[in-house]
Amino acid sequence: MWKVLLVEDEVFVRRSLRQLVNWEEMGFTITAEAGDGREALERMREQAPDLVIADIIMPEMDGIELLKQTRSEGLDCRFVMLTCMNEFEYARQALEYGASGYLLKLSMNKQSLGEALSKVDRELAGSLRIRSQQVSESFVRFYGQMWQAIHGGGSGEAATGQGPAAAAMSFADADGKPYASVWVGSFLHGEEPFTLDDFRKLGLVSTDSRTVMHLFPHSGQTTVFVWNPASGPVGRRANGAAAPWAFACSPVSAPRDVLRVWKETLRALDRHWYESAVGGAAVPASGGAAAEEAPSLDWKTEREWIQSFEQRHMDEFRSRFRSGWSAIGRQRLPMALVKETAVRIDRTLARIAGHGGVPADSLLGCTTHRALGERLLERAERYAERWTAGAQPVTGHPEIDKALAYIHRHLHEDVTLRGLAALVTMDEAYFSSLFKKKTGVTLIHYVQQARVGQAKKLLEETVLPVSEIGERVGFPNTNYFIKIFKRWTERTPNEYRHGSS
């Protein structure tokens, strides 16, 4: 909630302002009142309101002088002036000194006050974004440090040379004052983006002129850090219906506790990810010490999946995958680590099937463990179908077939005669001669044709730039890629793409 100071010498006008709109639904709360400009200035120095609604004509110090004094002292707040019909010259002066607007007292109603508050809300939100961005660089490094401490098993000291507790307490605002508290909330939003505006509309935490906010997105979830959240009431905004995302949050804590608090919110989302089929709920954090990190997925399990797929034993692959995925669910491994594992396995299977360069966003965006497993299995079966449809040649010679399988799995790498000959334990000259005899082409021509074939798929099925496609299929530079592609297709990559669309 933005804090409001009402400055008006007529008590009934202040009372009318309080009753005219639902301030909390508009995102504001009236924290103080004053009867003249001099009293108002003292309140501002004490409480630092975000918005001052002030009459222009008052005893002691009028609204224009209050605005001037505020600006000269560097107090950061917005002004909306109250004026009568014959005071337009004063209103013009107020706008020149930076007032956000003015209201005519005699015709003021719910709509006009609501529009003025909405305008100020947008201005304050813009200032919050700018203020947060100005100090974001060191915070972003700090969030990455903590993320590694949570999921990488380290102490979290690598990035700054100090632990998270000490680093958090070292941050200070523009006035050099340390941040006294921090609010942490983690949102499981899937493939849909999550913004600060989305967060603010939920009305979960109050803000003021010393508050900064940052987002840390990762794997379909985003954590919001609110440094120096304002004290006072927190209410839901009028346009902030129930959250469409699952989320876990922690009350205001001392900065030294931010790592512990973040762990708790992430673990709460982990529980929801494993146990719930839908989002859109607030997930209670544990409130206690975070559990020790669970181990990552056993490499033996991954290897069994990959071996079954590589040997094209899809029934065995499905059985092993479902069994292993259920085991992950029972272990309750951290969601982020499971998603990273899923992406790594997906890329390996795609590469084996000669279908590289497939975006992994749909995996990272899964909002339940079950959905991720189903999507990963669907993608694996799709790779297998395409692999079977364009299966690599089989010569019947075990060593040459072994070399061909290696070539198709490692097209993106430097495939050499020496390396392949060593792979099948043959003399280089003999292997080269045997390879041409069994395939009908030289090794270099076979590799080029295989790379061009893979490049065709990427040109047809993705919007990746030509330079990146060439790199992904193993060409050392774009010019060489274009030259070889044109040699085998009589078209440049761009001509092929346009002709295929």
Image: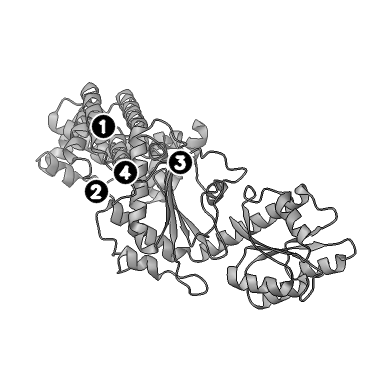
Residue with the mark numbered 4: 340
Residue 442 visible? The answer is: no
Residue with the mark numbered 1: 325
Q: Badge 3: how crowded within 10 Å, few (<14), some, or many (20+)?
A: many
Q: Are marks 2 and 4 in contact (CB under 8 Å)?
A: no
User: Considering only order in the chain, which callout, 3 or 4, is on the residue closer to the N terminus?
Assistant: 3
User: Considering only order in the chain, which callout, 2 or 1, is on the residue closer to the N terminus?
Assistant: 2
Q: Nearer the viewer, residue 478 or 383?
A: 383
The structure residue drawn at horizontal position 29% and vertical position 64%, both measured from the top left corner, is 158
Q: Position of residue 166 (x, y in %)?
A: 33, 68
Q: Are marks 4 and 3 in contact (CB under 8 Å)?
A: no
| Marker disc for residue 293 | 2
Residue 204 appears left or right of 453: right
Closest to the camera, between mark 2 and mark 3, is: 2
Residue with the mark numbered 3: 189
Amino acid type, mark 4? Glu
Q: Badge 4: how crowded within 10 Å, few (<14), some, or many (20+)?
A: some
User: Considering only order in the chain, which callout, 4 or 2, is on the residue closer to the N terminus?
Assistant: 2
The structure residue drawn at horizontal position 49% and vertical position 66%, both measured from the top left corner, is 135
